[in-house]
Amino acid sequence: MLVTDIAEEISVLSRFEKILLIEKISKMLLEEENPEKYFDPRKSYPVFTPINQEKGANQLQQFLDQQKS
C-alpha cells in the first residue's frame, strides 16, 4: 500500500481517531526498537573505536595533506 493511499484513507478519520492511530504506530515503532529483537544477549559484539589507532589517524592525515597539494 502506498503512502498516498494511506493518507487518503486517514484524511476521513476524526481527529481523535488520528491520534489513536498515531499512538498505535508509535507503539509499533517502539517494539521494533527493542535491541533484543536484533541481538543475542548471550553473545558479545565487537565495538570499534579510534582509541589506540594513531597509525590510522596519521595515514588519514597524510592522505588529506596529499589531496590538498
Image: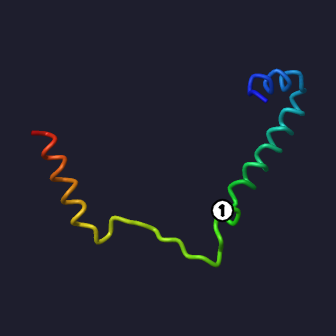
Camera-nearest residue between 62 and 8: 62
Corner quadrant of residue 38: bottom right
Say which amino acid is labelled 1: Tyr
Which picture quadrant has residue 54? bottom left
Judge by depth and name the residue closer to the eye, 19 or 67.
Answer: 67
Identify which residue is drawn at 84% across, 26% down: 10
Front one among 41 and 13: 41
Residue 46 spot, x, y in % from top left? 48, 71
**Position of 37 relative to 6 (above/below):** below
Residue that appears at 21% across and 65% down: 55
Return the residue found at the far left.
69
Which residue corresponds to mark 1? 38
Residue 30 position, x and y percent, is 73, 53
The image's colour scheme reads rainbow
Q: Is residue 27 above or below residue 42?
A: above
Give the vertical position of 9 relative to 25 (above or below): above
Q: Residue at x 16, y 41 (%)?
A: 67
